Image (cartoon, grey):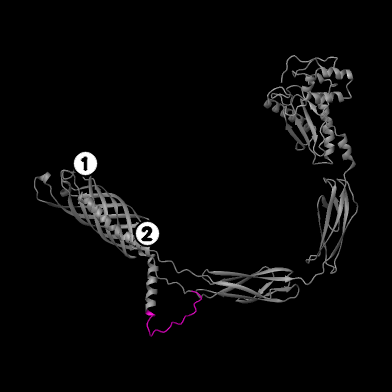
Amino acid sequence: MRNWCAALAMGALLALPLCAQQKNSGADGDTANAAEKSRASSKAVAAQGLLALPVTPRPTPFPGPAAAADTRPPGTLVPRYEFSAMYDYINFAPGDPFANFNSHGGSGSFTYNASKWLGLTGEFGGYRFDRDLFPLTGSSTPVSGGFVTYLFGPRLNWRKFDHFVPFGEFLVGGATGGTELIGTATQSAFAMAAGGGVDMVLTKNLAWRVAQLDYLMTSFSGSAVTATGRQNNFRAGTGLVLRFGIPNPPPPPNHPPVAACSVSPASVFAGSGDSVAVHVNASDPDNDPLTYSYTVTGGAVDGTGPEARWNSSGVGVGSYTVNVKVDDGKGGTASCAADIKVEEKPNHPPTAALSIERSPILPGERTGITCHGSDPDNDPLTYSYTTTGGQIVGSGSSVQFDATTLQPGSYDVKCTVNDGRGGTADSSANVQVKEPPQIKQLEAKLALHSIYFPTAQPTVAKPTGGLLPSQEVTLDTLASDFKQYLTYRPDAHLILEGHADIRGAKDYNVKLSERRVERTKSYLVEKGVPADHLETRAFGFEKNMTSEEVKQLIEADADLTPAEKQKILKNLLTVRLANNRRVDVTLSTTGEQSVRRFPFSAKDALTLLSRSGGETPKKKTTAPAPAKKAKP
């Protein structure tokens, strides 16, 4: 217990200098700042003498070169090799029934530091002792002896402080002792040491190992030690450490030069052959001799010093940059640049007049465009065109305006004439694109008729079914007319709206109407109608026609005789349900909706009218008898 108390006390003493250094660093700043403040204070006191003369200031545009002396704190330096010579005290614990005894001796170690934090240590130590072997010999007369240790292992260093280096180590190896230690013949056994300490770095090559505290384990077996074959010992030591292989301090940093460029004059006229003076104002903080090198984006520079001239011979109109690189010969460089403009002599702009060969034109047609340009300086002219619609085909003064894909309307065409010297002229004209007469004819002809489906068709199992021959004929005509209509109105769309009769749940009818519009859409696509010109909507039974609306449609149907109308109206419920199993078609450009005319005269009319959705036998009468049982 006394040994461990002593170890704790020594550990506390070792921590005191580290704490003091940390506190000093945090409270007052680093030692360099403290020294600087002290020097400043002493200078101020010295200058307060009554007979002191004022100090004349000297111009110092740049600080002088830094001194090459090593000012790094010695505790932060990393020696490649360390040799230590130590005095060691060991409290050896042979184990019960023998009493602990003190050993004194010395050790030497060699450490190779692979990095700032990690080192590899080899250690050899020799120790002498006096001990009592009373439990073994029955005599209290002390005997003298000795033993040696030879250990090897890693060492971790904490090189954070200016003058202190805490470390920890874990060493393994062996120990050799004689009869006085073991009780038998000389024996070598396994040994291990684990602990640490603190080095106080006096100079970069010399340190005082203030203390090193280790747990030292040996595994001797014999009559003079415990039968367990393990001895748990305590070792404390102090000594000197020689440090070698410390890298030299880095050379003082080089300060790069600074430079600024200017030109005079800043602009010249093209073809004048004038030269421009280039001046470089450069200086170096370390007063290093400077060299100058020039590059330019056009023209040539004559000169290699701070003064040079740029020659404008052979360069065209534009902006040219003179780049200067200043080098101090030690890796420090500075760059600067100056721009020189080469300007054209005053220019007279051209004139332009635009004429249209033919207007108005129809969509898809072309008309000629001529831009008449002239230049007072006889400069070669280039022509460019812009338009609010259509395309310009060709180049030069004569081109064509292409009205392909255009909608009827008025389109501006603009011609810009450029003389290549900054002079431009614009001229504009208008082209009228009129609506072709075929559009009205096609819109009038376009067969917009609602499409009717049998009950519960198409099904989920067969989504491509349910479209009867009479309705396919209607869609064939619609597809043919709409494809022709798209050649004149490429932005037109057909809106397909699906419906279902009131029987069945809401969700069921919405999905049924979705299948109906998708089947109608897929059939039109099969017939060549672009899919992106078809929109689909499904309403289920939300927009069902009422009995009164169906009755009005029947009475207005000119294809039915009065007798046929009377028979149909007797089965108005069946007819109303059939009229609501439909897909309406709307043309987006006009908003025209398909005609709702049920095909009573079609061969498959009875199938469309059937409430059950199955094929019913053909009868002479047009209207079926009322169904007994309704199915969705």
> From this viewpoint, which residue is outermost toward the front?
548
The reply to whether the magenta stretch includes residue 52 is yes
Which is nearer the eye, 54 or 383? 54
Kind of residue at badge 1: Thr
Q: Residue at x 55, y 69 (%)?
A: 333
Name the secondary structure under disc 1: loop
Q: Residue at x 39, y 84 (%)?
A: 52
Kind of residue at badge 2: Lys
Q: Quadrant of residue 325?
A: bottom right
Residue 62 image point, x, y percent? 50, 74
Is residue 604 visible in the rendered image? The answer is no
Q: Is residue 522 above or below residue 438?
A: above
* Overall secondary structure of the magenta section: loop
The reply to whether the magenta stretch includes residue 429 is no
| Left or right of 177, for residue 77 | right
- Residue at image mark 1: 228
Q: CA distance from mark 2 to mark 1?
A: 42 Å
Residue 189 image point, x, y percent? 24, 46
Query: What residue range appears in magenta?
Result: 46-62
Q: Is residue 84 above or below residue 494?
A: below
Q: Quadrant of residue 279?
A: bottom right
| Left or right of 335, for residue 404 | right
Is residue 388 visible in the rendered image? The answer is yes
Q: How crowded is the residue under tag 2: few (<14 C-alpha within 10 Å), some, or many (20+)? A: few
Q: Quadrant of residue 80?
A: bottom left
- Residue at image mark 2: 160
Residue 348 image point, x, y percent? 82, 69
Which is nearer the eye, 596 or 241? 596
Q: Are marks 2 and 1 in contact (CB under 8 Å)?
A: no
Residue 529 image point, x, y percent? 79, 35
